[in-house]
Amino acid sequence: MGAELIDRIRALEELKTAASAAQVRATVQFEVVQRAAQAAVGVPAGQRGAGVGAQVALARRESPARGGRYLGLAHLLVADLPHTLAAMSAGTLSEWRATLIARETVYLGEAADRRAVDAALSADTGGVDGLGDQALVAAARRISYRIDPAAVTARARRAEGDRHVTCRPAPDTMTYLTGLLPVADGVAVYAALSREADTLTSRGDGRGRGQIMADTLTARVTGHPPVTARRAQAGMEPNEEPNGQAPEQATGGQAGKHAPGGQATGQATGGQVRIGQPRRTLPGPSWPGPAGGETPRGGPPRDGAPSEDAHGEARPNDRRAAKRARVELQVVITDRALLAGGGEPAYLAGYGMVPAPWARELVDGRTDVFVRRLFLAPDTGQLVGMDSRARLMPEGLRRFIQVRDRTCRTPWCDAPIRHVDHVHAHAAGGATSEVNGQGLCERCNHAKEAPGWAAVPVEGPRHTVVTTTPTGHTYTSTAPPIPGTGIVSPAGTAGTVRTVERAGTIDPPGTVSAAGLAQAAQAADAADPDDAAGSEPVTVLSAS
């Protein structure tokens, strides 16, 4: 029985690989058809092929960026790597290993050179039999270097243009901050962090080497002590609330009246609630600043305030450095979780879901926190609607849509939102409104401008968009649930959405003005406190 199962696994693997080869050929054929169709409707030659990668990505249930890379891989396999594609068709070379070969040959200047490497690695020569991935890459590089050494040097120069920094979520409210740097710069950065770790360790610092390096990186880039150091210096336990309070004792802005025993300490101004808690100076060591200097105990002061040196003497504050180090974080959290110790998880823009106690730490006195109140229907998570006659998305509407959509709304794409644009094009009569707006990455926003693409908002539990591609295929995207979705009123029925029109504003029905959000929330509560308990306020914290 065991031998039969192994045979079945092998057969299925070969079938999967052969199917990958067939998919490669179909992808190239699809682009040929699409380019011909675009030429027939008068698309300029330089613009033909637009949107093809995005359609392939949707068909493969992956992001448009991956779809574009796959389209390039398919081109290379069909045109220049026939032996590699044949091995895929035979089921002996996986798509991943074919990608490795393509990656090590794509930079060669001539198609003939790529075909020479492909032939040298073909099954006929036994070039890849039994090789692991690293050995396969090494073999492809060795042959490529021998055939075209100048291309290797040019590749290294081009690679320097790809330097960048990325931030990806990691488990337990951690992140992977990754920098792709030229080797000299990368080694220099690591060496500097290592030297700092060696120095502090020799002085008896109790942190681990990796912790010191991470803390030093944070301090030198932001100019602030890392959050772990601030928590440790304040004597807080990992799950303890700021200021040493238990969760149910935390107080805050205007919504603080909902917290048991809490008092409202903030003031509503321009649709924002300032959390009114004093800044606290924490004892502890000096931290390296953004320019390599030291930031005194407690981190840099507020703009315009005097700072202290290591001996407590006042010295002028460098406002320019403070502005460079200013960073804004946006957290979406229910007011019950923020002010009454509730456990509903919050959402950190650019990261994902985070525990409520972690989000509450943003109210720490060392952080400037501004609150914008939004409202949703608890059963569906639909945010209140807004309307505008403006051509461009107003800043308040842009913020609203960014909070609602979080990331690019194209299915299977979680790239950051770069463009907030109309679902139904403004040129075609589409309104500038919350319903007709969506957040997209730059690639997806450009892709939908190609001929044959259409999108329309439709009725759904939350904001929903249906996109139709040139081939007639449709894809549905629904906004993700906001913290507080699914919470029901004490009577057991879902609360109704509270809109600004209940506050007696002069704006059109359904309109949310940035300057009136806080006043609307207060007026709605005062007008009908019983109904107010049935809907869920959602707070957007901007902490810097």
Image (cartoon, rainbow, N blue to C red):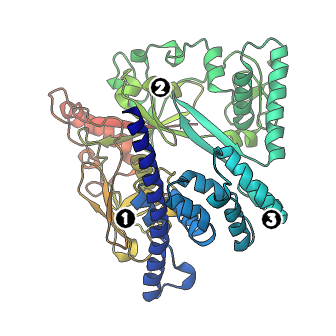
Q: Earlier in the sequence, mark 2 or mark 3?
A: 3
Q: Earlier in the sequence, mark 2 or mark 1?
A: 2
The residue shown at (65%, 52%) is: 128
**Element carrying mark 2:** helix
- Mark 2: which amino acid? Arg
> Residue 15: x, y in percent?
43, 54
**Element carrying mark 3:** helix
How far separated are the C-alphas under marks 2 and 1?
35 Å
- Mark 1: which amino acid? Val
Task: Look at discs 2 and 1 and give the one toward the viewer.
Answer: 1
Q: Earlier in the sequence, mark 1 or mark 3?
A: 3
Q: Which quarter of the rendering shows the N terminus? A: top left
- Mark 3: which amino acid? Ile
How far separated are the C-alphas under marks 2 and 3?
60 Å
Judge from the rendering whether residue 375 lies leftward or rightward of residue 227; answer left or right: left
Residue 147's label in the rendered image is 3
Task: Look at discs 2 and 3 and give the one toward the viewer.
Answer: 3
The residue shown at (53%, 37%) is: 169
Question: Is the residue under label 3 in contact with that under label 1 (CB below 8 Å)?
Answer: no
Q: Which quarter of the rendering shows the C terminus? A: top right
How far separated are the C-alphas under marks 1 and 3?
50 Å
Which residue in the protein does label 2 denote?
360
Which residue in the protein does label 1 denote?
423
